[in-house]
Amino acid sequence: MKPELLIVDDQPRNLDALESMFAPLDCVFVRANSADEALLLLLRHEFAAIVLDIQMPGMTGIELAKLIKQRKRTQHVPILFLTAHLMDEHDVLEGYDVGGVDYLSKPINPDILRSKVGVFIELFRKTRALAQLNDALQREVAERLKAQEALQTVNADLEQRVQERTAALTSAHRGVRENEERLRLAMEFGRIAAWEWNMATGEMTWAPTSPEIVFGFPPGSFGTERRILTALHPDDRSHIDDAITTAIETGHYEAEYRAVRPDGSVVWIGERGRRVSVADGGVPRMVGVSRDMTVEREAAREREQLLKQTRAARDEAERQSRLKDEFLATLSHELRTPMNAILGWLAILESGKPMRDVHSALAVIRRNSELQARLIEDLLDMNRLLSGNVMLDVSEVDLASMLQSAMQALGPAADTKRVQLIAAVDPVGTIRADGRRLQQVLWNLVHNAIKFTPGGGRVELRLTRVADAIQVSVSDNGRGISPQFLPYVFDRFRQQDASPTRECSGLGLGLSIAKHLVELHGGTIEAFSSGPDQGATFVLVLPDNIASRAADTDGPGARRAASV
């Protein structure tokens, strides 16, 4: 049975988003729209973890968590709090006081949330498996004790019968044989084999069950030589030779090793033995047992893997925390710079001092206000995209005209840097798409190319039809992208130069927003670069199945070219 995960939120779309985030996890999602519904579900199910929204009408997430922790059946279930509001230390401490294991603010990084919840799901699965294994071992121990008690009872009864009458000897022998069969079954069930080792000749005698049956080998796999040397793993041979040498010297034998079955599978075997005292002239012997330890080894290996996964999750959380800190520092700097300019010019205007050109001052204030508004709009766009609140306004869109509009809008910025804009446009016709959003994508790609291209450089735009798709490429011969940063170029809050003294401003959200918008249209966007100072190319591909009609007004294969 798969582990169950309870997600509680009064907003169905939040539940849909959470379920989408957790889709890769191998578990069953149980949704609750209120605290009361969550309490009813907790009476019917056993959950691996609870993802709980703080702000809910009626009973809040904190109050629900208190009730959950008061019940003995659910007090150990991990709770992860989610909130869309700013939280202070009091809120965080209150969440931890009621038993929460983590406190996350929306918007949530899906990888972090999935990694944290995945750890608790895996822990729940392993805990349940270990509990089942423990129950089986307890039953096995009880059966062994029962068999021993039965053996003692039969032996006591046998001694009494021997003393009372010789006629009962046959019945007593039958009882011994039955006990031997019980012992054999018990040792088979426990995967234990007993042996006797003639230390003078090296001959082995196994009883009451053959080692082939116990350890899963074909009949006749082992002869009478010491240990299971015929199937010994090569890497363990020197270790076993040392253990045998020690046993001959001290009379005590102890070893763990691997035996390889004919099908290539490996069984871990643990052995213990002790030399038996012999009279003068007797043959030195050692008796002992061999036990299948594969299950214990596998459990230890799984625990180690779980620890590695936990450490990896912790490292990823620390990395995300560092990225968040860098982003907050960048955001503070980017918002403070235009604000300082605005406040400075407003202070000059309010002072009443004569100014030669008031319009220039107002232009500076407007330009910095628009810059700040654009930064805030980028933040809001990213939040809407992550929460799934972006709806496309689809209509007929002429990509060629849209590309020309982007070039005209950014022409002044290119002229200021002495960057040449060149466009080559094939007659691809119109498509059904959200024109405003595609314009936002194109503007971002061209603006980035201009921003990272030095004076005297060029930016080339191409609109073509490739196979069953429409392709837009934006290439420049500017700064380029390092191979180390290229895989992360579309990650939000990530910038190749994240230092406060970097030359180019920005929050590192534009390309991430562009990627989300392109994917909403069913397309793809990729970045290519040969390295620093080698320029960069961004390729946007939209599927041809959204094309509504082709425009061949200039004839087959014609291309319209423009430059700014």
Image (cartoon, rainbow, N blue to C red):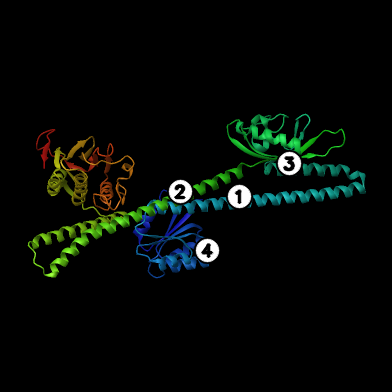
- The answer to whether 561 is drawn above or below residue 409 in the figure is above
- Residue with the mark numbered 3: 184
Q: Is residue 155 visible?
A: yes
Position in image of residue 326 (x %, y %): 33, 54
**Residue 146: which numbered mark, if any?**
none
Give the number of marks. Answer: 4
Q: Nearer the viewer, mark 2 or mark 3?
A: 2
Label 4 packing within 10 angstroms: few (<14), some (14-19), many (20+): some
Position in image of residue 471 (x %, y %): 21, 39
Q: In the rendered image, which quarter is residue 404 located in?
A: top left
> What's the distance in space between the residues labelled 1 and 4, CA to CA?
23 Å
> What's the distance in space between the residues labelled 2 and 1, CA to CA?
27 Å
Say whether marks 2 and 3 touch (CB < 8 Å).
Answer: no
Circle nearer the N terminus (2, 1): 1
Residue type beneath disc 4: Gln
Say whether marks 2 and 4 touch (CB < 8 Å).
Answer: no
Circle nearer the N terminus (2, 3): 3
Residue displayed at 35% across by 64% down = 86
Position in image of residue 132 (x %, y %): 59, 51
Q: In the rendered image, which quarter is residue 449 located in?
A: top left
Question: For the residue labelled by badge 4, is the local secondary structure a helix, a strand or a loop?
Answer: loop
Question: For the residue labelled by badge 1, is the local secondary structure a helix, a strand or a loop?
Answer: helix
Circle nearer the N terminus (1, 4): 4
- Residue with the mark numbered 4: 75
Q: Nearer the viewer, mark 1 or mark 3?
A: 1
Label 2 packing within 10 angstroms: few (<14), some (14-19), many (20+): few
- Residue with the mark numbered 2: 312
**Which image quarter holds the C terminus?**
top left
Residue displayed at 58% across by 46% down = 300
Residue type beneath disc 3: Arg
